[in-house]
Amino acid sequence: MKFIHLADLHLGKIIYQNNLIDIQEDLLNQVIDYMNDQDIDVLVIAGDIYDRAVASRESITLLNTFLSKLILKYHKKVLMITGNHDSSERLNFATSLLVDQGLYIVCYPEKEIKPIIIEGVYFYLVPFFKPSYIRYLYENDDLKTYQDAFAYYLNQQTFVEDHSKVLVTHQFIAGNKEVVRSESEVILSVGGSEIIDVDLCKGFDYVALGHIHASQKIKYDYVRYAGSLMKYSFDEVNQVKGMVEVTIDEKGVCSKIIPLKPKRDLIKLTGKYEAVLHYPNNENDFIAVELLDKQMIGHGYERLKEKYPHLLQLTYKKLDIKGENHTASSLDMDKNSPLDIFKEFYEKMKGEEMDSKSQEIIEELLEEDALYDAH
Ligand SMILES: [Mn+2]
């Protein structure tokens, strides 16, 4: 059988005040076209459907249209889990609506996973969870880390032995090699305690991952992040974005990325001002310009904006500055506590010290690890 593995759609995402919904809609239509052309009947979405817990009206409409087309019009099956950006409560309402037609949405980890069986392949859907949820589900207070909770959760399950099986999850699964990260991802917890060892996923024929925005395999050929639907930050400009096509047959499992072409791409242009001003193309794209000039260019932004109407960012790489550097990177991240760093940031942004009431709020948030929830 063949299926498409997508993740991190982040519908409704806004970058630099630009709503990406039209581009996302076009990309999702490309997914539908490809599935129809290639006669692929199953779509797996490994979490982060929406960009925000409170999804915008247009992103809800877009998802509804997308799912209705796939399921009601083209009779495809769609398997979905929630990611850390999604609100389980908000996606959960739809879970039973279209089950008979082939829409499976799992928003909370089930005590005992009920696999979805399609053409003899067993799909196990594990939505994003924090350790606290598994502690509550099994009344086991010993599960402290993401790794503990994930290992325990898988251990509670009985997986089929004599059939191909696919695990779908949005936890941060990593191997011994560095994972390619992006600025557009949200860190789940400070200090890397959210990382789960990929070897816990052994025994599956394919592991469909969401959460990390660069499409990549993790240690094994069959463990794969699909990556985000499109580039969501300028550090992703060199990544290939798209959908992963997975084939499972008697020969085994293979997967390949099928690139998707956005109507408007994120591009980074580097060079001296005069050169960048005369580069060909890219007038239609979202642009970050990195100038190599040593001096600031008067009205540089305005003039570049005439050439690139969707210029979003202008930085200087080699500027000679005398005196203090006021960029965020001058903050001393190593020496200070998270609270100190936040205070310094606050002062730089607001030009005044944080009052004690605000400080209390920030302390509480840091303590509860609720900074993550706010995303
Ligand atoms: Mn994401």
Image (tube, grey):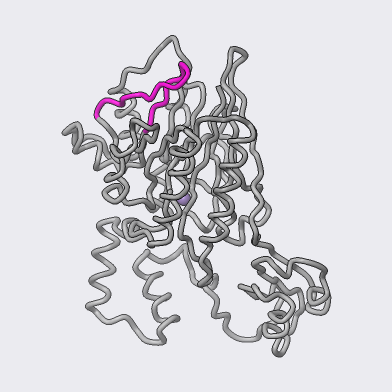
Dividing the picture into quadrants, the one containing residue 172 is: top left
Q: Nearer the viewer, residue 205 or 2?
A: 2
Q: Nearer the viewer, residue 100 or 84?
A: 100
Q: Nearer the viewer, residue 45 or 203?
A: 45
Left or right: residue 162 versus residue 312 is: left
**Quarter in which the C terminus is drawn:** bottom left
Left or right: residue 367 versus residue 318 is: left
- Looking at the image, the residue that sits furthest to the front is 73
Q: Is residue 121 magenta?
A: yes
Q: Position of residue 144 (x, y in %)?
A: 27, 39
Q: How many marks?
A: 0
Q: Position of residue 353 (x, y in %)?
A: 34, 84
Region rendered in magenta: 111-125
Image vertical order of residue 109 relative to residue 229, above or below: above
Residue lying at 45% horizontally and 13% vertically, measured from the top left? 163
Q: Position of residue 321 (x, y in %)?
A: 66, 83
Image vertical order of residue 3 relative to residue 133, above or below: above
Q: Position of residue 38 (x, y in %)?
A: 63, 31
**Quarter in which the N terminus is drawn:** top right
Residue lying at 45% horizontally and 50% vertically, measured from the top left? 65
- Looking at the image, the residue that sits furthest to the top is 162
Residue lying at 67% horizontally and 76% vertically, measured from the top left? 309
- Looking at the image, the residue that sits furthest to the left is 139
Q: Is residue 86 magenta?
A: no
Dividing the picture into quadrants, the one containing residue 160 is: top left
